[in-house]
C-alpha cells in the first residue's frame, strides 16, 4: 500500500506531503480493543495528513489509489514511535498465547477416558498421546527442530536458564537436570502404580515415552505463557502442576484444569493485544491471524452488535480446518 501512496504522489507531482511518517494511538470505544491506530504523514504546512481511497484507479492493479487529506484533530491522540523490535516482540507474544489457547482447548475437548490415572494405559493407544506429539512437533516446535523436541526445549527454552524467585538465575544445565528429574519421578511413580502393576519392558518404555512427552508439553505450555525474557521459577511450578494433572488426576479434573488454562491464555491475549496496539501495532494483523480467539470474537460482537458472528465463525472454521483431523 505504501508503494501505491508513492506512485500516486508521483503521478500527481504532489509537493504537499513531506517524507515524514508517524503513528498515533487514539482511544476509541468503537475500535478493536478500544484503541484505534493511524499511520499519518505531514503536509509541508505542518498539518497532519492521512490517506484515503480516491476514485482514481491504478491501471495495473485495478485498485483505487490513495490520496492525502487533512487528518481530524484528536485531542486524546498519543503519538508513538512504532519500533520494529517492540512490534516483533508483541507479535511473538500474541502467537505464543494463541498457541497456548489452542493447545489447552484441544486437551480440554479430549475424551476424558484417555486422560488421567484411569486412562493412563489407554493413553498409549488412544489419540491423546498422538495429540501431544503432534502439538509439540507441529504447533510448538519450529520446523528446524521437528522430530527432536527435547533438543529444542533444552536449547531454546531451558538454554537461557530460569529466573528464580530470589532473582538469581538457575543455569541451563541445572534447569535441564531439573526437568529430567521430574520425568524420572513421574516414571517411578507410574511404574509402581496399581494401574500398571509390574510393567513389562515394553510397557515401561511406553511409560517413559509418555512421561517425557507430557513433561515437555508442560514446559512448552509454561514457556508460551511467560511474560519475562526467560522462564521463571513460577513457570516451572506451573509446568510441574500441569504434568501432574496430565498423569494422575481424574479425566474430569484435567478437562476443568485445561479449560481454565485456555481462559487464562485468552485473558492474557486480550492484554497483549491492547499492549501491541498501543505500541503502534496494526489491528489487521490480529484480524488476519487470530480470528479464532474468543477475545477477538467478543470484541467484534461488541463493536458490531453481533453482526459479524457468522464471519468470525467462518474464520474459526478455516483455522480449525488447518488442524489434523484428530483435533476437530
Image (spheres, helix red, strand yellow):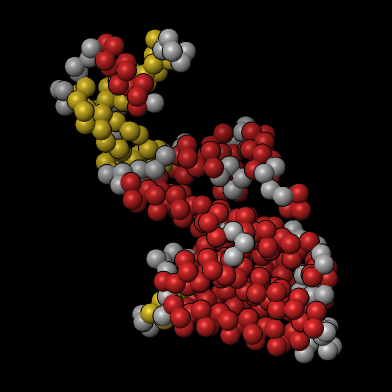
Do we see residue 216 in this rendering?
Answer: yes
* Position above or below: 302 against 185: above
Q: Is residue 309 left or right of residue 37?
A: right
Q: Position of residue 232 (x, y in %)?
A: 45, 74
Total labels: the figure holds 0
* Position above or below: 163 against 282: below
Q: Position of residue 179 (x, y in %)?
A: 56, 79
Question: Image quarter for residue 180?
Answer: bottom right
Residue situated in front as seen by the camera: 234 or 159? 159
Q: Residue at x 35, y 43 (%)?
A: 280
Q: Quadrant of the N terminus?
A: top left
Do we see residue 47 in this rendering?
Answer: no
Question: Image quarter for residue 181?
Answer: bottom right
Q: Position of residue 33 (x, y in %)?
A: 47, 44
Q: Is residue 248 left or right of residue 281?
A: right
* Position above or below: 168 against 218: below
Q: Position of residue 301 (x, y in %)?
A: 59, 39
Residue situated in front as seen by the camera: 208 or 99? 208
Q: Residue at x 19, y 25 (%)?
A: 18
Q: Residue at x 82, y 75 (%)?
A: 121
Q: Residue at x 39, y 66 (%)?
A: 229
Amino acid at each position: 500500500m505504501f508503494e501505491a501512496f508513492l506512485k500516486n504522489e508521483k503521478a500527481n507531482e504532489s509537493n504537499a506531503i513531506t517524507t515524514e511518517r508517524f503513528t498515533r494511538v487514539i482511544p476509541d470505544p468503537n475500535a478493536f480493543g478500544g484503541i484505534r491506530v493511524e499511520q499519518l504523514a505531514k503536509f509541508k504546512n505542518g498539518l497532519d495528513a492521512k490517506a484515503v481511497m480516491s476514485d482514481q484507479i491504478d491501471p495495473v492493479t485495478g485498485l483505487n489509489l490513495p490520496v492525502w487529506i487533512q487528518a481530524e484533530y484528536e485531542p486524546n491522540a498519543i503519538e508513538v514511535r512504532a519500533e520494529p523490535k517492540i512490534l516483533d516482540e508483541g507479535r511473538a507474544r500474541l502467537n505464543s498465547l494463541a498457541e497456548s489457547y489452542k493447545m489447552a482447548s484441544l486437551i480440554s475437548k479430549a475424551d476424558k477416558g484417555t486422560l488421567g490415572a484411569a486412562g493412563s494405559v489407554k493413553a498409549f493407544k488412544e489419540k491423546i498421546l498422538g495429540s501431544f506429539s503432534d502439538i509439540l512437533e507441529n504447533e510448538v516446535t519450529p520446523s528446524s527442530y521437528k522430530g527432536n523436541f527435547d533438543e529444542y526445549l533444552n536449547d531454546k527454552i531451558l538454554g537461557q536458564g530460569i529466573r528464580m524467585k530470589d532473582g538469581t538465575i538457575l543455569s541451563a544445565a541445572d534447569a535441564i537436570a531439573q526437568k529430567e528429574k521430574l520425568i524420572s519421578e513421574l516414571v517411578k511413580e507410574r511404574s509402581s502404580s496399581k494401574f500398571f502393576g509390574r510393567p513389562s519392558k515394553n510397557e515401561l518404555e511406553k511409560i517413559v515415552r509418555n512421561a517425557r512427552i507430557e513433561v515437555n508439553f508442560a514446559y512448552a505450555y509454561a514457556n508460551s505463557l511467560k511474560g519475562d525474557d526467560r522462564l521463571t521459577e513460577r513457570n516451572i511450578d506451573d509446568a510441574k502442576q500441569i504434568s501432574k494433572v496430565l498423569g494422575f488426576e481424574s479425566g474430569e479434573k484435567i478437562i476443568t484444569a485445561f479449560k481454565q488454562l485456555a481462559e487464562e491464555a485468552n485473558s492474557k491475549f486480550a492484554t497483549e493485544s491492547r499492549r501491541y496496539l498501543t505500541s503502534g501495532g496494526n489491528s489487521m494483523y490480529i484480524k488476519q491471524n487470530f480470528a479464532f480467539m474468543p477475545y477477538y470474537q467478543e470484541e467484534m460482537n461488541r463493536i458490531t452488535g453481533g453482526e459479524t458472528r457468522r464471519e468470525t465463525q467462518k474464520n474459526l472454521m478455516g483455522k480449525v480446518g488447518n488442524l489434523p483431523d484428530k483435533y476437530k
